[in-house]
Each structure stands twice: as C-alpha cells, then as structure tokens.
Amino acid sequence: MRKTFLICVAVIFSAGIFAPLGSLFLRITPEGFVQVINSPQFSSAVWNTISTGLIATIISLTLALAAAWTLERTAIKHKNFFVIIFGVPMLIPSISHSFGLVALFGANGWLTNIFQWNFNIYGAAGIIAGSIMYAFPVAFFIFMSVLQCEDGSPYLAAEVLGVPKIRQFLDLTLPYLKRTIISTFFAIFSMIATDYGVPLMIGGKTITLSVLMYNKAVAMMDYNSGSVIGAFLIIPAVIAFLADILNPAQKQNDFAKNISVDDKYSSRAGFIFCLSLSALIVAPILTFCVMIFAAKYPADMSFTLYHVMRTIHRGALDNWLNSLIIAFISAGVGTIFSFALAYFSTRTEGFAARIIHLLSIFPMTIPGIALGLGYVIFFHDLPIYGTLIILAAVNVMHFFSSPYLMMRNTLEKISSNVEAVGKVLGIPRRFIIRDIILPKVRFTLYEMFAYFFVNAMMTISAVSYLAPPAPKPIALMITQFEAQRLIESAAVVSIAILLTNLALKIFFTMLNRKTPASQ
C-alpha cells in the first residue's frame, strides 16, 4: 500500500509539475535567451518589475503590520468587522483591484470628475497602488496570526518597569517579528512580481516581466521567448521559498491573547487608521456596484439593468458555471490530495516522508503564469488539453502548498499515539482516519476546501494560457471586457466572483458554528 501510494504521488508530481516545467525550460535556446535579454523591452521590464515590486512590498508590509498590531494590541471596537473588510480583496482577481482604481482615478473616474484632478493613474503609480491592494490582505493575516501567538510575559514585565509603549514595540515586537517580516517580504514581492493582472490593466506604457511574458506567449504565441521570461519570473519565487525555509516560524503559544494597549488615544488613533484603510479597500468595490446599475458611468448615473443583461448575453452565465465546476473539482481533489500527503508526511518517518514534504511545498516556488505556459507546451497534443479537467489540474498544483501546510500544522497537534493504540487493538488505519482523525481536523478541511475554491474562482494567471481552447472561466472575461472598453460588464464579472466566494465563506462559517468542536 505504501509503495503504491508513493508511486501515485511520483506520477502526479511528475505529470503536474516537473514535466510541464521541463517542457518550459526545454524551449529555451541560447539564441532565444540572448535575443530576449538583449531586447530593450526586457531590461526596462526588469527594472519596472523590481522597482514597483519593492515599493509596493514595503508599503504593503508597513500597512499590514500596522493594521495587525492595531487589531491585536489596542482596545478598538468592531475588530471582527475590520478583519472581514481587510480580507475582502482576497476574494476577487488582482486585475479587479486595478480596475477599481481606474474607475475611481482614471480619466473618466468618479473622483477625478468630482474634484477635477489631473492625476494619471496609469503607469508605475497605478501598478504600485493596485499591487498594494492585492498583497496587503495576505501580509495582514500572516502578521495577525503570528502576533496572536506572541508570549505576553515580557510585556507584563515591561509594564511593571514602566517601559514606554514605543520602546516595547521596538525592543520586543519587532525582534519577535524579524523572521516573519523577512519571509513575508520575499513572499509578497514574489506575488507582486509574478502577477500580471494589475500591470496589464493599469500599467499603461510601464511594462513588467509578467506582462511581457503574457504578450509574448498569449498575444504573439511566442512560447520560446515566453519560456525565457518565465524562467526569470521563477527566481523571486525561489528566493521566497528559500527565505521561508531558512527562517522557520516561531514556536506558537497561547500567552498573547490578552495583550492590549488599553489607552483611549491609541484606541482612537487605531480606529481611525483601520476605518480609513477599510474605506480605501471598500471604495473600488462600491464603485463596481454603482457602475453595474448606472446607465453610463460616470456621465449618466440613472438606474439600469442593461449592463447585467449584456454581460449575461455575452456568455457570463455559462462561464460562471464553468468556473463553479472548475472550482469544485479543484477544491475536492485538492483537499483530498493535500490531506493524504500531509497525513503521510506527519505519520511516517524516514527519507520518504521528507521527500513528500519537499515535493508538497515545491509548488510555492512556481508562478502561475509560468506553470500555465508549461501546461500548454506539455499537454498540447494530449486528450486532456482543451477540457475543464486541465484547468482544474493546473489549479490544484498551483495552489496545493498552502492547504497542505494548513493540514500538516493541524495534524502535528494530534498525537500519533492514536494510530499506535489502533494498531495494538487491531483497528485498521482507515477506520482510525475516518472515525478519529477526520472529525478532529474537519475545520481545517473546510479551510482547505475554501482556499482551493476561492483561488480557482478568481485566478487568471495559469488558466489564461489554457482557455481557450478549454472552456473559459468567468475571471478571464474581465480582461476580455477591458480590452473591449466594456468597463461596466467587467464590473459585473468582478462582483459575481466576489459574491460567489463570499457565499462559500459564509456557508463554511455557518457550518463551523453548527458543528460542535471535537473533544
């Protein structure tokens, strides 16, 4: 059984990761490599990618740390509300963030017309702003989860000694977060550098490496040049992977739950900060809602359902159903596969378990835009190409690592003596898993399923190369409508994705509340 399992895992990773990546790298020739790096566009794209990525990463981390610290260390009201608002940008495609900025600050933007601003949102400034909206929630939840596990005893001692709050933050909080800040910095930079949704929509003449790769591989069908650029895009992801491995997270504990600054001035300042940040996050989404029902945004704001009906007539409903099918397949298969590998790596010792763990976290190093091109090259002549199955498969492999780590961390908290006792009593392992392990980890299973589903619904990076000829997911209609200047229809699609993901999140939240916790 063990041997069969390992063979199946080897086949899945070979076909889902290594063969597509190998096909990608095999398309790189010395002549093509030299041609790409010597082109004027490439050097400019490298500079734009690094400069905008670094600025957006630094600002994202700063805002995320400030927001997380405010919610965890001050006594502001409505904390749960702010947590929900800060997580909303994770439920829509990255391109929707930049699209919302254009609707607000573009040439015909709402705020531009009201205040008569002469501000050009297109270019580096727009890429940075859109990337911040895209990356901030990820950094926020990382910092928040770490701050929740900080030992509170040093702060209690500092209070007794009369150490000022600013010194506590500089001397206690920042050193504690040092490893998290380093690993999160590289992870966020990798996210921003490899994303093409934001720069494609709002970059204007500022071309990044991801947009250059998209133009070469999708628009011009130049897979050789696209492969060269894809190899470069893997570099920041590999650096982020190594940073995470070399900077392991701090050991968790339960002492920090009651640490807070019960000071009215800090609480007021924190509330104003979180409220302002929430307004910036919600503004583009509210603009989408207004655009959907406005006759001609922003010139004619009279109510109409024309844009909704036009979007449906252009195939939005069919593509939404395609996305639902892809998302459910990705979530179902991905959750089962992630659980199986997490269980094996935590309940097995030796070389095989270490290899399984390394294989499971390896997909974190691969940008979706590079993996998608590899799938096109490798699967092009196979029967699976052009079907919903290949879209689900690329989503499973692309988003696999995070759910795997969720389940691994949960299983490590469950004593392995359960299996040992079952073995002594002659109880088959499958019954131990079914009757004991699965009930204990069901909340994590819900989180894993939701993670796969949400990301499959809103991703455009990997699937953009595969659809068409495969049935088109609804998220790709945003780029289609944007190219046709049908901004209201693009807003309809963005809101449809958001509402679908919110519905799933609400469903699992209610399910968690109705299901009693395992004892």
Image (cartoon, grey):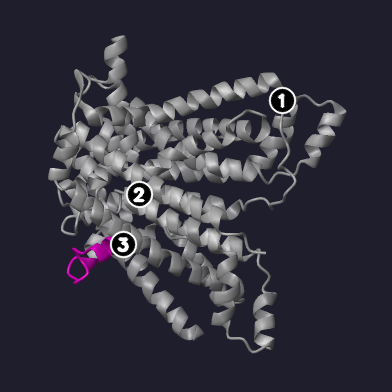
- Residue 433 in the image: state x and y as whole percent: 56, 76
Q: Quadrant location of the C terminus?
A: bottom right
The magenta region covers: 379-392
Q: Which residue lies furthest to the right in this view?
A: 161
Q: Give left or right: position of 518 versus 184.
A: right
Q: How far apart are marks 2 and 3 (CA)?
A: 26 Å
Label 2 crowd (10 A; few <14 / some 14-19 / many >=20) = some
Is 252 located above or below residue 160 in the figure? below
Give the residue type that dot 2 points to.
Answer: Phe
Q: How many labels does the image show?
A: 3
- Reply above or below: 411 against 120: below
Q: Residue visible at 67% across and 50% down?
A: 250
Q: Which of marks 1 and 3 is in front?
A: 3
Residue named by callout 1: 166
Confirm whether residue 123 shows in the render: no
Badge 2 element: helix
**Residue 95 shown in magenta:** no
Q: Can residue 332 be seen in this view?
A: yes
Which residue in the protein does label 3 denote? 392
Pointer 2: what residue?
232
Q: State the image quarter where residue 151 is shown.
A: top right
Q: SS for tag 1? A: helix
Give left or right: position of 248 versus 61: right
